[in-house]
């Protein structure tokens, strides 16, 4: 009995320590640890994106969407970082996660709850994670997932200008990247950054957004203009603002096929943060 | 008295015959009839085949329940002359597997998207009555499987294709195939049946040996290749389709497009029967039949003389310059009454 008290004490000291040597938490103690008392750090550099208005890929020609200034991770979250997360948050380990939060492919390539095979490099982006898991990670590092409009706002840039959508090669160049198989095993930040200094928007993984399925929901200024029907066959051609932007079609098609507990081999995420005005 | 009875019986017979004709001609009524058909028993996995082969005919069997399994893949294969192309497929082949049903069959279609796919895919079957032909219900991201169930209501030969955005690109990369719905009692028995599907490819060089899709050429409808069964020479040399003199040949011909309308012709033959546009109306004695993009036709002809019969898209530059050419090899005895070289003997 005394030993248990002692263990808890040691545990609490560990928790308080920021250098965070994470130990396996015994199941009977796990319950006693409050969610908020745990935290992990993200050292990923964030890039400030000055807000503005942009024309979303779906919607009427005239509807411009306002995007507030925000911070976004300069690159996707890596396998190594997600490993630290599951070490600190045992409920997100493969053997503990609930099916409603992540399907059976969750972290499937990993060799155990906390070990990865050599084929899954620590500096490559995390994949096979659900929206719930991505959101929990973002929460744990004090960030959030980017909104779809934020992500697409950043995605308009090539490495020269903030909005390259009018360039003829814009979509084709992205598609060239999209169609390469197994690129999710390449390390982050090896390709050149875009205009904002953001890396790997297209060349490694698809990325979750907080409201990935919002294009399926009619609402706000775009109410009634589209529903999921518009994603299929020729209907997409009616509502897309740029019918030759095949890369955007692919992203929206991908998002339309997702559910929050799906985990996909080439789908990862990066984090964002709001800028609070004083 | 007897005469009167005879006349009224005759009249009645006419009326009944008249009604019958009306019933079978009216599509709404026949679809209702198909809906009412009961598919008995436990679902079986349906036989599906790679081109140029087709599954066995339905014959006179009753409606049944089937499971059809299709997998969407993105796979590199030869397109022409040692050049590779990244095809997007149903079941790893272009065209996708041939599905054969009868009116009243109930199908649970499982669409699995391969785990190593890059993109989401789905299936829109023109044989399906319902939203998107199944496209919305079957959209599967890489590694996922989607399922929907439909009942075959209308007999005919139908195209299926992927309808995930960007649709033109999915079709241009080879995501199409044929699904046949035979009428009650089946199509008339023939000696040979083959599956041929035309599609054109818009390419640019990625490396010396690997080609990839060219969106601009697609938009301009200017293909580099117009092919039968997804590969130049897929019906030539040792891949020729075959028949013997005296046999009747039935070709299930589809056109995946994505853009071109085919002028399908067999050099040296006349189609005895053409199920125009894959529907119920049969035309006879046809030289060349139009097959729209996203459409199909069934052609039948008896072969009377041995030789190699060339299958072409008679929009003829496509045949000689872009690959829309195949061959039917007919073996057997000559019949000089029908065809011989030279004039009458003196």
Image: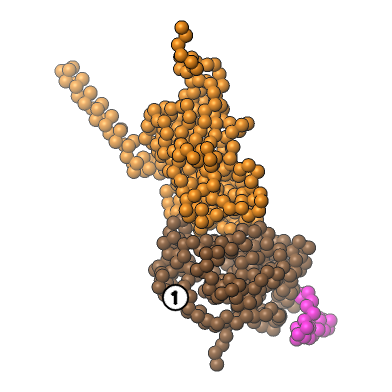
Chain colours: A brown, B orange
State which region is magenta: A1-26
Q: Is residue B78 left or right of residue A9?
A: left
Which x, y percent locates residue B268? 47, 26
Q: Outermost residue, bottom direction?
A: A278
At a point 59% along the width and 37% down the height, the residue shown is B233
Q: In what element is the residue under mark 1?
A: loop
Question: Was residue A10 drawn as part of the magenta stretch in this picture?
Answer: yes
Q: Is residue B46 visible?
A: no
Q: Quadrant of residue B235?
A: top right
Comparing A176 with A95, the one in front is: A176
The residue indicated by pointer 1 is A64
Chain bearing tag 1 is A
Comparing A23 with A246, the one in front is: A246
User: Is residue A177 shown above or below B157?
Assistant: below
At a point 66% along the width and 58% down the height, the residue shown is A181
Count neighbours of disc 1 (C-alpha within 10 A) and say few if under 14, some if 14 to 19, many if 20 or more: some
Q: Quadrant of residue A206?
A: bottom right
Which x, y percent locates residue B188? 45, 28
Q: Outermost residue, right direction?
A: A3
Q: Outermost residue, top direction?
A: B346
Comparing B150 with B270, the one in front is: B270
At a point 67% along the width and 80% down the height, the residue shown is A45
Which x, y percent locates residue B90? 57, 47
Q: Is residue B78 left or right of residue A30?
A: left
């Amino acid at each position: 009995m005394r030993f248990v008290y002692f263990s808890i004490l040691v545990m609490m000291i560990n928790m308080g320590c920021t250098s965070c040597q994470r130990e396996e938490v015994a199941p009977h103690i796990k319950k006693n640890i409050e969610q908020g008392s745990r935290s992990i750090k993200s050292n990923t550099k964030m890039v400030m994106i000055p807000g503005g208005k942009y024309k979303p890929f779906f919607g009427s020609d005239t509807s411009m969407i306002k995007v507030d200034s925000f911070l976004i991770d300069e690159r996707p979250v890596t396998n190594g970082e997600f490993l630290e997360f599951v070490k600190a948050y045992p409920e997100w380990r493969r053997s503990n996660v609930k099916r409603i939060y992540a399907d059976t492919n969750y972290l499937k390539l990993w060799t155990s709850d906390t070990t990865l095979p050599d084929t899954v490099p620590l500096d490559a982006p995390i994949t096979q994670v659900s929206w719930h898991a991505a959101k929990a990670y973002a929460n744990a590092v004090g960030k959030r997932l980017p909104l779809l409009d934020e992500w697409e706002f950043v995605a308009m840039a090539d490495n020269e200008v903030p909005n390259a959508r009018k360039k003829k090669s814009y979509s084709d160049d992205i598609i060239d990247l999209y169609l390469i198989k197994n690129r999710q095993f390449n390390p982050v930040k090896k390709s050149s950054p875009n205009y904002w200094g953001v890396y790997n928007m297209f060349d490694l993984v698809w990325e979750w957004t907080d409201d990935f399925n919002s294009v399926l929901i009619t609402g706000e200024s775009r109410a009634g203009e589209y529903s999921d029907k518009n994603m299929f066959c020729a209907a997409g051609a009616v509502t897309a603002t740029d019918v030759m932007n095949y890369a955007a079609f692919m992203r929206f098609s991908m998002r339309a096929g997702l559910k929050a507990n799906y985990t996909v081999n080439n789908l990862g995420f990066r984090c964002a943060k709001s800028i609070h005005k004083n | 008295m007897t005469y009167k009875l005879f006349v009224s019986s005759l009249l009645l017979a006419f009326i009944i015959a008249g009604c019958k004709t009306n019933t079978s001609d009216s599509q709404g009524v026949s679809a209702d009839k198909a809906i009412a058909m009961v598919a008995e028993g436990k679902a079986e996995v349906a036989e599906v085949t790679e081109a140029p082969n087709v599954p066995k005919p339905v014959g006179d069997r009753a409606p049944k329940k089937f499971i059809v399994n299709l997998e969407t893949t993105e796979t590199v294969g030869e397109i022409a002359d040692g050049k590779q192309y990244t095809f997007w497929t149903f079941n790893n082949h272009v065209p996708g597997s041939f599905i054969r049903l009868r009116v009243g069959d109930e199908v649970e279609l499982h669409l699995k998207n391969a785990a190593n796919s890059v993109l989401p895919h789905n299936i829109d079957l023109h044989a399906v009555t319902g939203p998107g032909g199944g496209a919305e219900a079957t959209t599967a991201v890489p590694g996922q499987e989607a399922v929907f169930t439909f009942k075959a209501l209308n007999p005919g030969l139908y195209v299926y294709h992927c309808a995930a955005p960007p649709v033109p690109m999915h079709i241009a990369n080879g995501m199409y195939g044929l699904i046949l719905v035979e009428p009650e009692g089946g199509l008339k028995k023939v000696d040979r049946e083959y599956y041929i599907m035309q599609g054109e490819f818009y390419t640019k060089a990625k490396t010396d040996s690997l080609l990839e899709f060219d969106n601009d050429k697609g938009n301009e409808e200017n293909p580099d290749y117009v092919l039968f069964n997804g590969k130049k020479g897929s019906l030539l040399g040792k891949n020729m389709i075959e028949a013997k003199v005296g046999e009747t040949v039935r070709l299930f011909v589809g056109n995946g497009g994505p853009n071109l309308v085919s002028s399908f012709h067999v050099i040296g033959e006349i189609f005895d029967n053409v199920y125009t546009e894959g529907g119920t109306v049969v035309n006879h004695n046809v030289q060349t039949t139009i097959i729209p993009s996203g459409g199909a036709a069934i052609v039948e002809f008896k072969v009377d003389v041995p030789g190699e019969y060339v299958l072409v898209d008679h929009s003829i530059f496509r045949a000689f310059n872009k690959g829309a050419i195949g061959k039917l090899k007919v073996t057997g005895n000559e019949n000089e009454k029908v065809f011989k070289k030279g004039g009458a003997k003196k």
